[in-house]
Image (cartoon, rainbow, N blue to C red):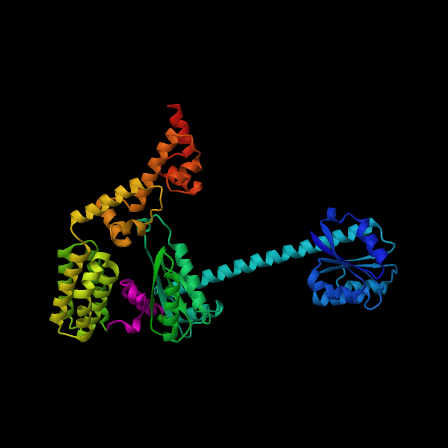
Amino acid sequence: MLKIMIVDNEASIRKGLIHCIRWEALGCIIAAQAVDGIDALEQVPAVQPAIIISDIRMPGMDGLELARRINEQYPHIKVIILTGFPDFEYAQRAIQYQVVDFVLKPTSIESLTQAIEKAKARIAEEQSNQELERRLASKSEQNLQLERGMLLHDLIHRVDLSNLYVINRIAQLGLNLTRYHVLRLDIAPLYSDVEDGNADLLPYLHQAQEVLCDSIGEYDMYFAPYGGQACYAIVCTADTDTLAARCQETVDVLSSLPQFSLSIGISRFFSDPMCMADAAHQADQAVQFACYTAETSVQRFDQLPEIPPQALQRVFDDLRLLKSAIENQNDGTAHDILLRLFTFMRENKLPVDTVRSVCLNIHQFCISLLFQPDAAQHLSASQDLPMLKRLIEGGSLLQLEKDMQEFVCHILAQTGGNTDDGADAVHTVQNYVRQHYAEDLSLESLAGIVYLSPAYLSRLFKRETGETLSAYVQNIRIEQAKTLLRTTSLKTYEVAERVGIPDPVYFSRIFKKVTGIKPRDFRRDESTQ
């Protein structure tokens, strides 16, 4: 309903206007009355009328002066003037003040209705134009962001572009690249079904981008995509310390979310857009260290161990393989990788401080990724603090290698157990799921039953059974649902609740995914057999 304000110093005329027209049929409602222009202007902010119908001659402030003031202060409000004086000068001024119509008294229902329809048509036209402008502006902004992302992608990936072309495009796209850092944001899944590719991480990456924008509000920032789990952010500032602190704020905010973890690598400060590929490479190297441990989710390139560029990737590769060997309880492989890694560092004459930094990273990801509740007390008392003290205080390269071999061996012994232990843990979880399928069976709660970390239980279950734990829980629930559909008259939503899936829409979707048909079709087919 469009709000109407009637302005006339005679109460009888105001009442007549209110009752002579079926305002609801016109899509309007009388929202206010005023005795003159001054009274009307005072009410406008609170009433916010769409249309004002005003007499032309009133004491205090007449209708034309009111129209002038409305046109200046509230140009979206449409004004209709009522007058008993068909004067050409009045009409000229009315047009100047954007008055919609000039209705002569005595006012007929037909003439006033036509004026109202004209005002409504003008309002609709302006709203349509505004919506079109909003859409065009949004489309233009989307195109601008797309073009910026394309240029940044080309710069990051060393596409052969001339200096002149880059300078011109930067100016055309309004980019500020006179001083910048490149960030690499990596999202890591925390659940086994995500690891198997059954979930889309892109929404979580966008969420991380939004939080980062909030944390780094005062700096210009541009994003460049890099797959579904990572992206680059170009942040226009030379202040590395403040930038690192804001990145840590972002990681801290997102740490409360259970679906994923975020790691950020930060390049050195650059001032030449043509060096963006170098900056991105630094961010890549930094984020690889950041991904190894929850202790350093934000890593600056200028604080990485001083490893020659040609050796850095080799060290990263061996660290990645070592982590995999420890997670999969491959004692011999872990020993061989450590031996190879230290041989490589000796042959390349890496400084002892650099080797010590690598050892500290191994120590950190061992503790953060593989600590189990039953191992924590023993390791804390007998191994962890003395080992950490030796790594920090020094020692020869040979001593560092010996300490790391002993430490990794101890971690494997304390956290992994043997194959039979793993099979027993999986068997215990399977029995629990079969008996408690209707309850909340989160990865954390199931891991607590067998005193394992959620991440380790997820990997162990997949290794022992060949399927993810979430898939196993899902299949058990669907099998129970099939039994209930076959043997009871429970409604579909009641069956869903009985098997631990309270959302009936989600239940139907999962049921069809597993069985190939909807629950109601399954029940119908079973009843006809």
> Residue placed at 83% from the left, 52% from the top?
16
Image vertical order of residue 299 relative to residue 482, above or below: below
- Residue 375 rendering spot, x and y as whole percentages: 20, 58
Q: Nearer the viewer, residue 173 or 291?
A: 291
Q: Nearer the viewer, residue 378 or 121?
A: 378
Residue 50 appears left or right of 84:
left
Q: Can residue 190 be seen from the camera position used here? A: yes
Quadrant assignment, res 403? bottom left
Q: Position of residue 400 (x, y in %)?
A: 14, 70
Secondary structure that dominates the magenta span: helix
Asked which quadrant contains residue 226, the reply is bottom left
Residue 165 position (above or below residue 135): below
Count of marks overlaid on the render: 0
Magenta residue span: 276-305
Residue 464 on image: x %, y %: 21, 45
Tell which of 19 and 52 is nearer to you: 19
